[in-house]
Each structure stands twice: as C-alpha cells, then as structure tokens.
Amino acid sequence: MNKGETIALVSCVKSKVAGPCAARDLYTSALFKKMRTYAEQHADRWFILSAKYGLVAPRRRLTSYERTLRQATENERREWAQWVFSQMAEAGLLQSGTTILWLAGSDYKKHLAKLLHGHVRRQSDPLAGMKIGKRLAWLTSRPQK
C-alpha cells in the first residue's frame, strides 16, 4: 500500500440481485451504481460497507440478504463499527497517510468515523448532509474521468 492512498467506503443498499455474484454487482440501485462509479474514479481502492458482512472487497462473492443498519439499535451500530474497524485494521487500511472517502449514509459513518479518527490522515465526505435525491443529483453532475 502506498502512503497517501485514498480508500472509498460505499454503503450497501436495499435493492439487490439474487446472487451469488461479486459484491460490486450485487447492489442494484441507481445511488449505489453512482457511488461505485465515483469511488472507482476518485479512490485508489474502494470497499463496500455491508450491514451483514462488514467490510467487503468489491470482487468478493455474496448472496442477497435483508439487513440494514437503519433497523439496528444504537448499540448494534457501535458494535458493527467496531467490527468493521477491526476488519480495516486486519486489511492494513489504517495508515497515517490514508484518506477515507465516505460515500455512505450516516448509519454507516457515525461510529466508524469516530474510530478512524487519529488512525488515518483525513476523512472526506462530499455527500455529507444530503438526502438521497441530492446525493444522486450531485453524483450525476460530477464529470466522468
């Protein structure tokens, strides 16, 4: 891994194909597809934040599931964030020069971002505070590389 690497974290979404398939192709919503494209163009590597599987590499094969963090309790979200933080550490993603590019909703970001503070160089969230419609419009308006 290079110092100064940008890692994008893209949250999972409800709409999925039946699978099994590569995680990058499992989620079918327009929002996920636009976040995936943005991540592929603006990050050195990207991962999916799955409510069921935690940190998921885009090529990992998954089957469809029904689980979201929206339905989880605050304590369950904290535990999920700790689990993902551990997965990121095991994957060697917690480097002082790393930038985290958030393309994830607040349920996925809230506790994990706090855990990442001090373990990465910086965290960037171009979609912060936007509802789904605004996120789609912002991502659609970005020039393709």
Image (cartoon, rainbow, N blue to C red):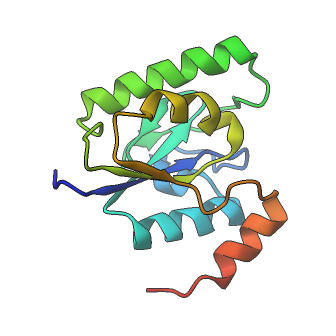
Depth check, front residue: 112 or 59:
112
In the image, is 57 to the left or to the right of 95? right
Vertical arrangement, residue 66 with respect to residue 132, above or below: above
Residue at horizontal 67 percent and vertical 79 percent from the top: 140
Seen as rendered, the residue at the extreme left is 2
Image quadrant occupied by the C terminus? bottom left
Q: Is residue 24 left or right of residue 137?
A: left
Number of callouts: 0
Q: Position of residue 90 (x, y in %)?
A: 26, 27
Quarter of the rendering containing residue 80:
top right
Image position of 115 (left or right of 118): right
Residue toward you, 67 or 41: 41
The answer to whether residue 14 of the structure is visible from this angle is yes
132 up-or-down from 65: above or below: below
Q: Tell me residue 20's x, y (percent).
A: 50, 43
Q: Answer yes or no: is residue 20 visible.
A: no
Q: Residue at x 26, y 34 (%)?
A: 91
Residue visible at 41% across and 42% down in the picture: 61
Residue 71 percent coordinates (x, y): 79, 25
> Vertically, is 89 above or below 8?
above
Where residue 19 appears, as percent x and y from the top left, is: 55, 45
